[in-house]
Image (spheres, rainbow, N blue to C red):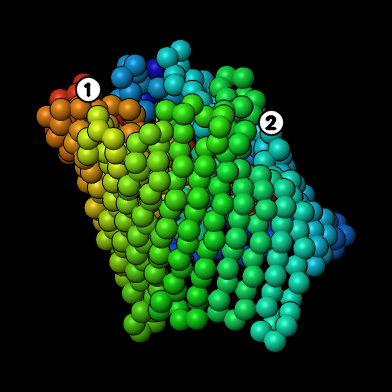
Amino acid sequence: MTSFGRAVLAGAVLLAGSPLHAQTASTPVSAQVPKPAPTPASPAAAPAAAPHLLPSWLDLHAEQRTRYETIDARYRPTEVGSDQQLDFRTRLQARVGTARWWGYTEIQDSRIALDDSASTIGTGATVRTKIEQLHVGAAWKNLGASKANVTIEAGRFSRDIGSRRLISRNVYGNSTTNYDGVLARVGAGAWSALALAIRPVLYTYPALVRDPRFTHLSLSGLYLTNSRHRAAVAEVYGLAWRDGSGTAEASRRSLNTFGARLSGNLGPGRRVEYETELAYQGGHVGARTHDAWLQHAQAGYNFTSAPWKPRVLAVWDYASGDANPTDTRNDAFDPLIGDRRFELGPIGLYGLIPRSNVASPGAWVIVKPTAPLETWLQVRGVWLAEARDRWRSVNLGDTTGAAGTHVGTQVEWRTRYRFSPHLEFDGGLTMLRESHFLRVLKPSPHGRALHLYAGLDFHY
């Protein structure tokens, strides 16, 4: 089927699935644009339902997203030609309690259709029906002389932490990252501290059961944040990842990640914005010593009084690669369970820019022609941080380094339109123009990869 035919089919399927009306009010999904993401406060309640329908101690929410996507070139060594899939993701959420105590649950069903016979499918696309969240929590306010606020939650969570680059609730993916454990937050004035002890929930494919290799996996850490000055919101953190004895000893990870992030808005009207994050990662992967780095930087300006309110940004992302895959060191940064879609491009069938072994500068323009419409254009150069390491998103590489480091240039256009508080469209077109690395190892007959997606998200 041609790309045009697939797009027509996508439109027909999406329109056929549209409901006549929504049941209850909900909070619209905000666009995933690069902005400082504070450590979220608790509780993470579902959007409030209409007050005349439900008692004050009960919130109910539901959402359903149908999205079609297609790509005309793939780069994994075993993949040939184009691919497509139709994603279905349905969520049911309920919260009971008060501001002092609460229980929260979310059930999610994620599955796909229309995939090609040679599609590469995993748990990122489908896990079917699973308990995405199920936790309880309690909060205490104005404790002691410092008037501290304390929140403790235990159970299963799906939540953004820090900048989202290392721990996130990924919004774009058809399945959603989650984890079991305990979160504790203490805040007083401009200071807050978030402690976590969790175990990411990982499934096997195609059985879609809890992966026994990660039975003893653990992720613990501490985030400290000071938001006293809007011009300089500071965050420092430390995370410890341990694969545990269920993982093969040769690939068992024992990683410690320490990072700092500074962000803010400056100048008249606070139109100038910036964010910078630096993280060091040490430890071991099997018998190999691990020593890796992550860097992110962005600076931008908001033309708030101009038509369409343009937001212009310059961005830079770097994550170290393995300089010599045959020695006793491993230098490739491990992104843990972080998200990359909000700044590195779509995942799903695309997902070509990893947060490991990459150096990527870019420019970004975001505009809002009308209140419900937001569209953006981003252009990124994509290089490998280390020529001898593989392009980790598709496991393609040249251990001699002769293919070089320049993967290509990515151009992304994305549009989101909110028809109502209950219905939102999200679509985009992303192209990766091949450079020397790809032309040498696995060229596309088009000289580029083109990815198209379009989806409707209903909120009830």
Q: Amino acid at mark 1?
A: Lys
Which of these two is toward me, 94 or 405?
A: 405
Q: Position of residue 294 (x, y in %)?
A: 34, 52
Task: Examine the rendering and report whether any part of residue 204 can be seen.
Answer: yes
Q: Which mark is residue 442?
A: 1
| Viewer-nearest residue: 370 or 95 | 95
In the image: residue 116, left or right of residue 201: left
The image shows residue 285 at horizontal and vertical percentages of 40, 37
Vertical arrangement, residue 190 with respect to residue 102, above or below = below
Q: Which mark is residue 129?
A: 2
Determine whether, in the image, residue 139 is placed left or right of residue 122: right
Task: Determine the residue positioned at 55% across, 76% down.
Answer: 191
The residue positioned 33% from the left and 27% from the top of the image is: 395
Position in image of residue 253 (x %, y %) = 45, 38
Would residue 298 appear left or right of 150 to someone viewing this image? left
Which residue lies most toward the left here? 402
- Give left or right: position of 111 versus 264: right
Residue 373 visible here? no
Q: Mark 2–mark 1 contact, CB under 8 Å?
A: no
Among the two numbered marks 2 and 1 on one chain, the one whose residue lies closer to the N terminus:
2
* Disc 1, SS: loop
Residue 297, quarter of picture: bottom left
Which of the 4 quarters of the picture holds residue 40?
bottom right
Q: Please tell me in which quadrant of the rendered image residue 4 appears.
A: top left
Q: Residues within 10 Å of mark 1 (few under 14, many from 20)?
A: some
Q: CA distance from mark 2 to mark 1?
A: 37 Å
Percent of width and height locating residue 162: 50, 60
- At 49% from the left edge and 26% from the top edge, which residue is drawn? 248
Indicate the amino acid at tag 2: Thr
Q: How many marks?
A: 2
Which type of secondary structure does the marked residue at label 2 adopt? strand
Image quadrant holding the N terminus, namely: top left
